[in-house]
Image (cartoon, rainbow, N blue to C red):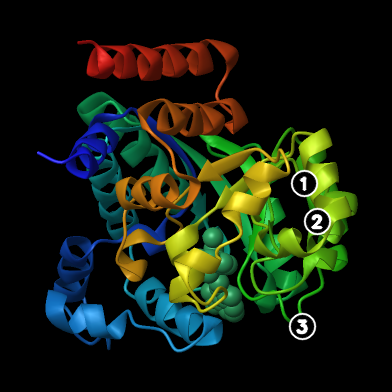
Amino acid sequence: MTAHHDLHAFIAGLPKAELHVHHVGSASPRIVSELAARHPDSKVPSDPEALADYFTFTDFAHFIDVYLSVVDLIRTPEDVRLLTYEVARDMARQQIRYAELTITPFSSTRRGIDEGAFMEAIEDARTAAEADFGTVLRWCFDIPGEAGLESAEETVRLATTDKLRPEGLVSFGLGGPEIGVPRPQFKPYFDRAIAAGLHSVPHAGETTGPETVWDALTDLRAERIGHGTSSARDPKLLAHLAEHRIPLEVCPTSNIATRAVRTLDEHPMKEFVRAGVVVTINSDDPPMFGTDLNNEYAVAARLLDLDERGLAELAKNAVEASFLDDTGKAKLAADIDTYTSAWLAP
Ligand SMILES: O=C(O)c1cccc(C(=O)CC[C@H]2O[C@@H](n3cnc4c(=O)[nH]cnc43)[C@H](O)[C@@H]2O)c1
Ligand SMILES: [Zn+2]
């Protein structure tokens, strides 16, 4: 067996945390097929080979169109429950022990799913998944920025109303296209979410320049940045992220699939590490981008020239940057160390 194979096997068994992964964007061909069979009028193909073609994007706007067609497949609380539970099953197979899943409740409630039933479905799936697979799920509710301030109001209402707010909710985000959707307009909504105890984790600098990342830091009080890819173009920003230990949620294959970055070799993650920025590795919308978290770690190992210990450090970055409590962080970090020591023992 080659060292390369060994590294893939190491990654496959490495306990991991994932901080940037979308709920609907995690629907595997198996889950999409099941949802498409429930709703045969949908334009989403159910055949896995046709799906691979369907999930090939010309640009970010095309990706969002396709994404919303999959959102249209989720029509009932039972669809929401199935999706959430099955996503956790796929995570457990990859040794993902903890995941903060980005959910866009506005997209579901505006399509007619009852808000209370929606919350019940995700919470029911969360507790069942933890009991059945051992994977701990937490939620980030994100505003789909392009849908306007109405979507921001609805998202913050769902996130902060006591009788609706789900127990697993830890953070508040902002997704969708960035071009023509300035971050500062969302400040009042982030202020309310933060006042209600939620962490701020907007997407920024995925498809626009570093000024969007500055806006996310200044106006939205971001504690982590989703993608942050264009930060590499601003040395002062890199120094700021490093000094304030604001982690980037890096999603390399996503950036290629949406054509935000031309090739993996041009991905700036090495510049981030060189500047001392905390890098976490994530899969974003794995089946849509033909990837999974294990593959993203393999990509990072190649681009950052990491061995097993380097990969273990990367996995621990995600644990440290997560919103797990200190006991949960210590336990998962210790599991990573134990696994790595056993793997490297003679
Ligand atoms: O749901 C609607 O009706 C709606 C109307 C207008 C606009 C939107 C959106 O823009 C939804 C965007 C959707 O995309 C999710 N997402 C998944 N991956 C990414 C990513 O890499 N970067 C940004 N957004 C992403 C996001 O969570 C939103 O749910 C919806
Ligand atoms: Zn994302």
Q: Which mark is residue 222?
A: 1
**Up/down of 34 relative to 226, above or below:** below
The outermost residue toward the front is 2
Q: Residue type at mark 2?
A: Ala
Q: Which of marks 3 and 2 is nearer the N terminus?
A: 3
Q: What element carries label 1?
A: loop
**Proximity of marks 3 and 2: CB atoms separated by less than 8 Å:** no
Q: What element carries label 3?
A: loop
Q: Which residue has dot 3 on it? A: 180
In the foreground, 70 or 301: 301
How far, Cα to Cα, is label 1 from label 2? 6 Å
Q: Which mark is residue 216?
A: 2
Image point (76%, 36%), residue name: 196
Q: What element carries label 2?
A: helix
Where, quadrant-wise, is the C terminus in this rendering? top left
In the foreground, 299 or 177: 299
Q: Where is residue 184 in the image (x, y as percent from the top left)?
A: 87, 64
Q: Where is residue 240 in the image (x, y as percent from the top left)?
A: 85, 44
Q: Position of residue 175 (x, y in %)?
A: 62, 64
How far, Cα to Cα, is label 3 from label 2? 15 Å
Q: How crowded is mark 2: few (under 14 residues within 10 Å), some or many (20 or more)?
A: many
Quarter containing ligand 2?
bottom right
